[in-house]
Amino acid sequence: MQQLTAPHLSNTAAQALLNAIPEKIKLGLVAYAAELEYPIEAVIEMAIAGFLDEDAISFIDCQPISNNGKLKMLDSDR
């Protein structure tokens, strides 16, 4: 598997993901991107980063691991 070196999701990767997810999820992401007037790759990146780290809005500021080495979303101390 090719490792990404760019700090953001590419349009090509976003389109591949959109082609692989259920239609209702795709429509929701596309509608949200249109509402915000953001590119679809930014909205998908926000969704993934926000799932892993509720304070993150992009891959750059996403810190999914807390100080105790656990995923933040699974960390019961939070």
Image (cartoon, helix red, strand yellow):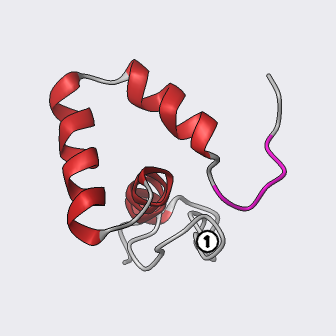
Horizontal side of residue 28 vs 58, given as left or right: left
Q: What is the magenta segment's predominant secondary structure?
A: loop
- Range shown magenta: 4-8
Q: Point out residue 26 in the picture as x, y percentages from the top left corner.
A: 27, 34
Residue for point 61% across, 76% down: 61
Compare residues 62 and 75 and report the one nearer the observer.
62
Horizontal side of residue 62 vs 72, given as left or right: right
Residue for point 58% across, 69% down: 62
Residue 2 versus residue 49 in the image, above or below: above
Q: Point out residue 42 in the picture as x, y percentages from the top left corner.
A: 48, 60
Q: Secondary structure at mark 1?
A: loop
Q: Is residue 5 magenta?
A: yes
Q: Which residue is mark 1?
A: 68
Compare residues 43 and 54 and report the one nearer the observer.
43
Asked where in the image residue 60 lies, by quadrant, the reply is bottom right
Q: Is residue 7 magenta?
A: yes
Compare residues 10 and 37 and report the one nearer the observer.
37
Residue 20 versus residue 37 in the image, above or below: above
Q: Quadrant of the C terminus?
A: bottom left
Q: The disc labelled 1 sits on which kind of residue?
A: Asn
Q: Quadrant of the N terminus?
A: top right
Horizontal side of residue 27 vs 66, given as left or right: left
Q: Point out residue 3 in the picture as x, y percentages from the top left corner.
A: 82, 37
